[in-house]
Each structure stands twice: as structure tokens, then as C-alpha cells.
Amino acid sequence: MSEVEIGIGVRDRGEDAGERAEPEERVIRRYPSPEAVFRASYDRLVQTLTLVAGDREVAADAVQEGFIRLVREWRKISTYDDPVAWVYRVALNLVRDHHRSLGRLARLLLRLGREAALEGGAAEENNGAPLSATAVGDALRALPTKQREAVALCCVGDLTRRAAAEVMGVSEGSLSQHLHRAKEALRARMEKTS
Amino acid sequence: MTTDEELRGALLSLAGPVEWRGVWEEIAGVAERRRRRRRVVRAASTVAAAAAVLVLAVTCAPKLMDALRPVPALIITDEEFPGEAAQPSDSARAPADSGRLDISLSGLTAYDLNFTRLWERILAETGLAGEGAGLEDFDVSFNRADGFTHILLEAQTKDGYSVTAGGSPPYEKLSVSWQKLPEFTPHAPVVYADAVFAALDSVGLAKLRDTLLETREPVPAEGHYAFALAYQHAWEGDSIPAGAPAILCEHGELTTLAPDDERRQVQDGTVVLSGTIMEKVGGPDEPAAGSSTTLMYQSTDFVFFVFPARSWEEANQLPTPEQEAWLDALVSRWEDKGIRVLDVTTVSPIAGDNQLAREEVEKTGLDPESVLPLVCLFVAESDMELPDSVFHYHDIEHQALHMVEQGIPLRILAVFSVDEDGVEELRSMGLMADRPADAELSRPQKLPLQETQTAIEAEVGTACLELGATLDILEVKDEDDGRHVSIYAFVRSESRELVGPLFDRPQSALWNLNQEDARISVLKVSLDESNGEALLRGVKDYRFHRTSYWIEPTLRRNEDALPDDRSLR
């Protein structure tokens, strides 16, 4: 892997965000090229965004667009502490835009009394590349958006709380709360099922 | 107790494996294609400067001569000007006070020429500093097929060098000369050379040619210009709005370049090029040997705009907590007043609008984070259809202005409609800040509600009687943003010709009542034919000084209006 890491990253994934969190050290990652960023992070980005978006295709499109912009802006982004976090942010914003747009359409269709059409569309979408209908999947879908984003970014995306908070555009305190609640909800569902 | 690792494992299992073979190649390919199209346009030309450009600085004259006569082409290959920007071959060395050199040319057609790379090559070969260089003259002529007939470039560097590059048949080389100007006062150029070249490259000569040829018909009258409005292809930091035109052509008069023209406001950073298309309109296709034939050309002047790429950071997409609170207040207000909100955002789907909104705020000296530079309201397209959209637009704007008056620092409001296919369309966009308002009208009324109602009823009843309408409902309500009057009337078909003035008739009575502190804020008039056909929708906002109306096209709103004065709104 062509990633070069400078500094020390303290990954306290084992610690619940709702508990007292130790301050994280700054992580600086240097990559020789956009392709190195891609090879180091693409699969994890898609997995994380899939959990956020609930749709593999949407996630993959958003991540690919993030990398296209990374290539375009490489001269600038390569100086950032963590280019991967930047791609996360771009992709997350694109997923959010997609959801907003879908939400507007859904609200309009509901308004127009076309619930049947909406249900048809939703069913079709779920036939594409959906999350499997597991207990965790159900619980994840039921989470509020920010909780879902927090748990995906921190638990799967391997981002520190600080980086995840920056990606989401919230404070670290807020991120910790979302993460804590999300984990509690998912754990409860998993334990109930088992 | 489920551990974090177990939770992570479950989530990863849920997300599933990722296939990424071929993905990087696709990403790199798309990025490369976009890179070729995109050149950041940087120019200091304001409207005034742009006007000066037309006269003084730059002439770009693609003379589309007859394509029959074989013309040696000025050709520059991609091999000579590779993808990355050319670096000065010896950037450390100072250029000589004067010099001359040739750049050899070979290879591709004229339409593959990249002016930016050509300029960078000239700078690299001469050792001149290109940053901040101004373009003094630029003239390029080419024929319809693929060949140049002439190229001339004159620029002045900011450290006082004049550089000229030119070529003429047979175009095997481009002759470049430069010299230090004996007397030079540093000054900001009217047009930056790299901006002009980037602008041209962003569109491409072939597309420019095709666009201008399409624009040629109908030929504008003498003294008029054909506009070729070229929009920069890519927006930095966001995707291109779906369906956005890459090039739009219109005919127009030179006077429409006036700075106060709202429709054609030229933003900072816009590059303006003027030129002439010449096309052969008479004479033989091939002059006979030894004969003397006069060829006739038809010329069309044009002005070519390239708007700059707008850049904005993704980081600015997210509203601050304070902005979110303001948004919530706006949405609550709209919904309380019956406006059906699909969504509200601080980011426009039209990327350039976000930058413009921020610039509008920055011009006022405010921090964009401390206000709401732009709010986009999404509503159903069905709510935006005439005639009732007259009321919907008014309600949206009135309530927004009310909230601005209450302290919400909203600057610009954009209203988008969403159709059943999810297509979003900008329907209106306007400045909400610093709008005149009559604050008196939102204060408690001195004239009692009942007295106001009685007075209006008498006035409207008389008007209806005279105009052949029947007053159906008269509502007078006191709300927290003033007193609202709504009139619903209908008319039989035989009387419909006369009822147009029903919107204006009550207004003088309401004005009189406001002199008695009735404090009427809004008047709405709905008039239908008895079969339900809409005839008139009008709203007058006394508080924010706005009037909007729609009238059935065969009717007249004003009793003394000319027959053709039948505005829709």
C-alpha cells in the first residue's frame, strides 16, 4: 500500500462515544497520488456510504464522484491532513443531496395521492442492491440520519471521532451523542434477536 | 453484551464486499475528460471593463471564409503541448531585453489547438513571466473546415515586456518576438491573457464556430450584435446542473450590454470577446483561372461571453446551527400560513447561485455564516400553476419578508418547483434583504375590524353592482402580520367582459381606510365566471409594496387600459 502516515492516529473504536472520550491526536496521512488514496480507501468508503445511503449503487456513484473531484483538486487536497476524510465528506454530501431530492419527490407524490406509485418505486429500488433484511439492517434503517451516519463513519469507515465530526459538519460532542445512541439501538436490536 | 467488534462485523457484513476492478480506470477517465473541458477563467473585467474590451483591447475575429480554397493550416500537436501545463524551460533565467524565436508547428487541425498550452509554450520558450499578463490584441481567423488563415497575439507582461506571436501561410512555424518596453508603468490589464485563452479553450473553436453560424440567422441589423453566450462547462465543487446549456445564443442589440440591464448582468470575471463572422454569399464556388471575380461576403458582428467557473467549498453546504434555527423558523411560518413546503435548503441545486449569494453578502460586508445568504424553497409544481400561483408566490414572499422584518437575516430567496418526475425548476429568485416595508401596517389597528368590514363591503358591493359581478365572500381578518382582506366574486358569462377592474376598484377605498388606521396589509381578489372558470387573481401587498395579478387574456384589468395592455402578471 502506498500510503504514508505521519503522526500518530489514536483509534479508540472500542470506547463508547457517550462515555468520557480522550482527546484524539491529529492524524496526518500523506499519499503519493489520488490512485493511492483510491486503493487505500475505496472499498471501505463504499461500504460506509452504503450503510448511510441504504443503497449500494447510490453509494458507489457518490464515492466515485468524490474520487473524480479528488483527482481534479489533487494539488490542493494532497496537502490536507487526511484526503480520505475529504472524499468521505464529498460523498456524504452527495448522498445527502440525493436523499433530499428523493425526499422532495416522495413528499410530492404523497401529496398527490400517489402512495401506490411511491410504494412501487420503493420496492423496485429495494430490488436493486439493498441491504440484507437482517435485524441490524432493520435497526440501521430505523436510526435517525445523523445516528446512522455517525455509526457508519466511526465503526465501518474507520474515522476518528474528530474526523467523522468534520465530515458530518457537527461538533465532536454532538457526534459522540449520535454515535452512542446509534450503538445502543443497534446493540439492543442484536441482543434481542440473538 | 455485544462488543464493538461484533457490531462492526455485523455492519460490514451488512454492507457486503465491494467490487472495484476497473473502477479506478473509469474515475481517471472521467476526471481527464472533465479536466480537458475545464479551465478556470480568471479575468478582472467588470461590466465597464468588458465594454472597453469591445472597443480597445481584444478582437477575436474568426473569419469563416470560403472553405473551397485550400488553406495551409496552423497546426499544433498534442505531443508538443502535453496534458500538463508547460513549465518554463528555465524559469530561473531572466529573459533577454529582446529576442526572437520560432515555435515549430505540425500535426493536428486548427480545432484541436489549445490556446492555453500555446501561451504556456511561448512563456516557457521566452522565459517571460505570464502571470498577470494582459492581452493587448488577439486575432485569429480560420476557415470553415479546419485551417487558420491568420493568427496574431500581442501581450504585455506585468514586468514590462511586450510579446508578439504571429503566423501566416504556410504556417510551419509561429514567430515570436519580445522586447522590454523602455517606458513602462505597471498597471492592471483590462483583460488577462490566460483568462481569454482559458475562456476560448473551455468552449473550443469548433463549438464556437458552430454556435456562431447558428446565431447568424436572422442577420442582425447594422449596429447590432449577435450574442453568443457561452457558459463555462464545469462548476468547481459541484456537479453541472442537469440540462444546463453549454452555449446559448441570442440576438440582441449592443445597448443590451448596458450595466443596468438586469437580464444581462455581467459578473466579475466574465471574459468578453468581440469578432466578426464573414461568409461568402455570392460569386462562383471556384474562380476560373485568369478571371477577375468579386466575391461578396456577409458579415455579422458578435460578442462572445464566457462566464467564469464558480467555486465554492463543500464545507459550506451545511448550515450552521444558527442558520438551521432560522430555517426552522421560516418553514414553521410558511407552513402555519398554509404553504405546502416540500423542502428548504441553504444550498441551491444550481451551483453558481450559491457563490453569487455569498458574494452578494460579502459585498455588504457581512460574514456569510452570520446570515442566510440563500434559502431555496421547494414546492410542488401543481402549486405553482397559474392562476392561483399568483397567491402562492405572494404568500411565500410575504411571509419571508415578514420574517426578515422579525429579524431573520435572509438575503436571497429562491423558489423551486418539483414535478411528478422529480425534475426541479427554478421559478423565482429575489433579494429579500433591505426591501422597503411599511412597519406601521403590522401594528394593532385603530379602526375596528367590523367597521373596516362594513366599509369594504359597501365599496365592493357597489363595484360589483356596477361591473355586473356578485360578491360571494368578503373576509377581513386580523393576523400577526396585519389586516388581510380577501374578496371572492363571480360573474355570469354575459357580463364577464366588464369585470376586469374589480381588482383595482376596491384599492382606493382600502387606501382611504388605511388613512384612518385600518392598517390593511394585504388585499386579495378572486373572480370566477359562474361556471367556475378563473377570470382574475390579484394581490396587493400594502406592507411590502408589491402587486401581482393574473387576468384572463380576453379581459381588461383597467377600465381605461388599451386593448393590448393585458399583462399576465
Image: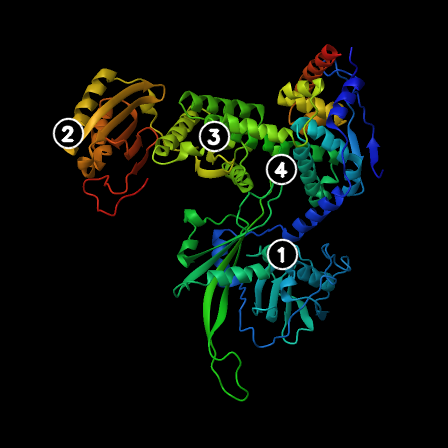
Q: Earlier in the sequence, mark 4 or mark 3?
A: 4
Q: Chain of mark 1?
A: B
User: Element under label 4?
Assistant: loop
Q: Which residue is mark 3?
A: B410
Q: Earlier in the sequence, mark 2 or mark 1?
A: 1
| Residue B250 in view here | yes
CA distance separating discs 4 and 3? 21 Å
Residue B313 badge: 4
CA distance separating discs 1 and 4? 24 Å
CA distance separating discs 4 and 2? 61 Å
Task: Give the answer, above or below, for where A17 lies relative to B63.
Answer: above
Q: Which residue is mark 2?
A: B465
Q: Earlier in the sequence, mark 4 or mark 2?
A: 4
Residue at 76% from the left image edge and 21% from the top image edge = B10
Mark 3 burial class by Cα count in 10 Å: few <14, some 14-19, many 20+:
many
CA distance separating discs 2 and 3? 44 Å
2 vs 3, front mark: 2
User: Element under label 1?
Assistant: helix
- Name which quarter of the figure residue A37 lies in: top right
Q: Position of residue B82 (x, y in %)?
A: 73, 58
Q: Chain of mark 4?
A: B
Callouts 1 and 4 on one subunit: yes
> Which amino acid, by three-letter code, is at mark 1?
Asp
Q: In the depicted view, which residue is nearer to us: B108 or B39?
A: B108
Residue at 36% from the left image edge and 19% from the top image edge = B480
> Which amino acid, by three-letter code, is at mark 2?
Leu
Callouts 3 and 1 on one subunit: yes
Q: Position of residue A152 (x, y in %)?
A: 71, 24
Q: Earlier in the sequence, mark 3 or mark 1?
A: 1
Left or right of residue B26: residue B489: left
Q: Earlier in the sequence, mark 1 or mark 4?
A: 1
